[in-house]
Image (cartoon, rainbow, N blue to C red):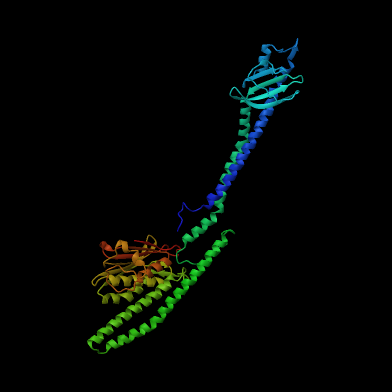
Amino acid sequence: MTATASDRKSIRRSLVTVLVSILLLLVTLAAIFTYRGALTAANDAYDRALLDPAIDLAQNVSIESGVPKLDLPPKALEALLYDQTDEAVFQIRAPTLQIIAGEADLEPDASVAPGTHRFSDVVYRGKPVRLVTLRTANGFWIAVAETKHKRNWLVGEILVAGLAPTLLIALASALVAWIGVAHALAPLARLRVELLRRSPDDLKPLSDAWAPVEIAPVIGAFNALLEQLRHASAVQRRFVENAAHQLRTPLAGLQVHLELLLRSHHPAPVRAELERLLAATRRESHLTNRLLALAKAESPTEEPRSGALVDLYTVGDSAARQWVPHALDRDIDLGFSLHHATVAGDRVLIDEMLDNLIDNALLYTPPGGTVTVACGERDGVAFLSVEDNGPGIPVGERKNVLERFYRIAGTPGQGSGLGLSIVREVVERHGGLLDISEGAGGRGTRFTITFNSMKTRSDQPAAVRT
């Protein structure tokens, strides 16, 4: 079952996803380390300022008459704890844990040993605060806490200063990764374009001189497949050519003998049978010649000679000499409107193409009808056309008639079914455009072939316009 575009895995998306995921992980780790570094730096910067009030309070605690007290006037205490940004509170306890001064609900760190201090982060009255607990040598507890506004701002500034370049580098790296992946996958796009530009009959091996190491094996495998297809096509073509060649000689001989027999006197029934046999022989000979022409037109090894210039006027003039007697025998007015127009291509194939178009027109045009062959230039582009006033081809059938052995149901005639297929192959070999339309006055059919260049042959496959 063929996978849809949404089901297929994208190499570009996979590579970019991996690279971006790695970048996001690195940015996350950088943010974590930067935050920890910023928090440490902020604490280092402000912890000393928080410890100073605790030391001052400890130096002003004394025992008078066996009663501990804080020997600081209110104004000095207010100045000691004043801060423009944060709020600060304190508590002093005696060695017996009796509260001497400060806030009663502020809990000091009970694990602090005498003569030391410790910083900690706690929540006081629903707010996160930084707490320093100082224990004097004689056992007093001094606790000072302040909110973290200054610290948070400093951490934010450090994060912005540290992460902004990191984020810019990450974004630039992601962009570079996208561009790099696109550049790395460019050979695949080039390979795709090269394959799409090829015509179905172009089985030449692909060049891997430009291909990276990863793509060269794919091109090698594809070339191996093309070689197999080339071999199979050559075998089929040789079979058709050999069979046609083997049939053409005995059929020609049989046709000559039958024509000689018909010159003699025979009873009516015998003569009728001989005439039917001669007609069948002619049809088989015609089909054999068409098979040979189709094999030549389809041959991928026989490129049209791009250096050979063909004048469409001479092609039409040669066709006139050959087909006017046939048209007269069928009571059809075969006219020619020929002007000089030079194209690069294979004269034999172009002759065969025009012969098939004229033969097809004469075959399906009723007696008394007209067929017109024209060639020349329009806007600097060479063209060749064959127009008849026969029954015409319905729009829905115009592409189908180019297929081998296809015949529109109910149409008269005894064609081989290969003539228009040969026309299509020759047009494709010359990179032209085949246009099938109605004839003058909306009657009949007009086949028009335009060539892409007057002097050079295009390597693009032919198009069919209906």
Given the current orientation, which residue lies at the most extreme bottom position?
A: 265
In the rendered image, the vertical position of residue 61 relative to residue 43, given as above or below? above
In the rendered image, the vertical position of residue 184 relative to residue 412, given as above or below? above
In the rendered image, the vertical position of residue 291 relative to residue 401, given as above or below? below
> Percent position (x, y) of residue 235?
47, 74
Residue 184 appears left or right of 392: right
**From this viewpoint, is residue 271 visible?**
yes
Q: Quadrant of the N terminus?
A: bottom left
Q: Which of 218 and 87 is in front in this view?
A: 87
> Percent position (x, y) of residue 77?
68, 14
Residue 162 appears left or right of 362: right
> Percent position (x, y) of residue 256?
33, 85
Quadrant of the rendered structure where residue 327 is?
bottom left
Q: Residue at x 49, y 53 (%)?
A: 8
Q: Which of 340 and 247 is in front in this view?
A: 247
Quadrant of the rendered structure where residue 61 is?
top right
Q: Nearer the viewer, residue 179 or 383?
A: 179
Q: Nearer the viewer, residue 163 or 29?
A: 29
Residue 115 appears left or right of 178: right
> Percent position (x, y) of residue 343?
42, 67
